[in-house]
Image: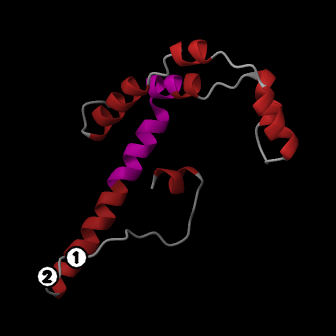
Amino acid sequence: MKFLEDVGYDGSKHYDAHAYRTEDYEGVKDFARGCMRTYLMLKEKAAQFNADPEIQAILAEINEEDPALAALFGKYSPEKAEAIKALDLDRVAISSRGLKYERLDQLTIDLLLGMRS
């Protein structure tokens, strides 16, 4: 849902879900209304996520690119693959860099549960 909103998708949207088989016609309509309500709530939460300065700062840090590696990103080529394989990477240094995923997870849960405005 967040992705569809972020890229401005304006086609049809639906959940791959179904009302309980025990529901009558009114129950199925309740289910459909509930799905749309949930979508709209999550759309609002996605906008909050995108506007939250702390969340966005963590994402910027996580997604920070090394300019020396920028040429290796993008469309695959055998040359890029060989260049990546030839890199001398310091596994210990790379793994010692915390990416703050746990903090990001908690901020996301706080936002979804209404504890962050």
Please state the extent of the stretch shown in magenta in the rendering. Answer: 41-58
Q: Position of residue 58 (x, y in %)?
A: 50, 24
The answer for how far apart the CA atoms under marks 2 and 1 are is 7 Å
Left or right: 92 as drawn, with respect to 14: right
Amino acid beneath label 1: Ala
The quadrant the N terminus occupies is bottom left
* Front-most of residues 86 and 29: 86
Identity of the amino acid at label 2? Glu
Q: Tag 2: Cα neighbours inside 10 Å, few (<14), some, or many (≥20)?
A: few
Residue 55 lies in quadrant = top left
Which residue shows up at 23% across the image and 73% down it? 31
Q: Which residue is mark 1?
A: 19
Label 1: element kind: loop
Q: Which mark is residue 82?
A: none
As drawn, 53 above or below 15:
above
The residue where tag 2 is placed is: 23
Above or below, comparing residue 99 to residue 13 in the picture:
above
Could you tell me if the residues under marks 2 and 1 are in contact, i.e. CB atoms within 8 Å? Answer: yes
| Quarter location, residue 11 | bottom right
From the top left corner, tell me how far across and down residue 111 is, in percent: 32, 35
Residue 51 part of the magenta segment: yes
Residue 19, magenta (yes or no): no
| Residue at x 79% of width, y 35% of height | 72
- Frontmost residue, 16 versus 1: 16
Q: Quadrant of residue 10?
A: bottom right
Q: Is residue 97 left or right of residue 41?
A: right
Residue 4, position in %: x, y? Answer: 52, 57
* Residue at 75% in and 19% down: 88
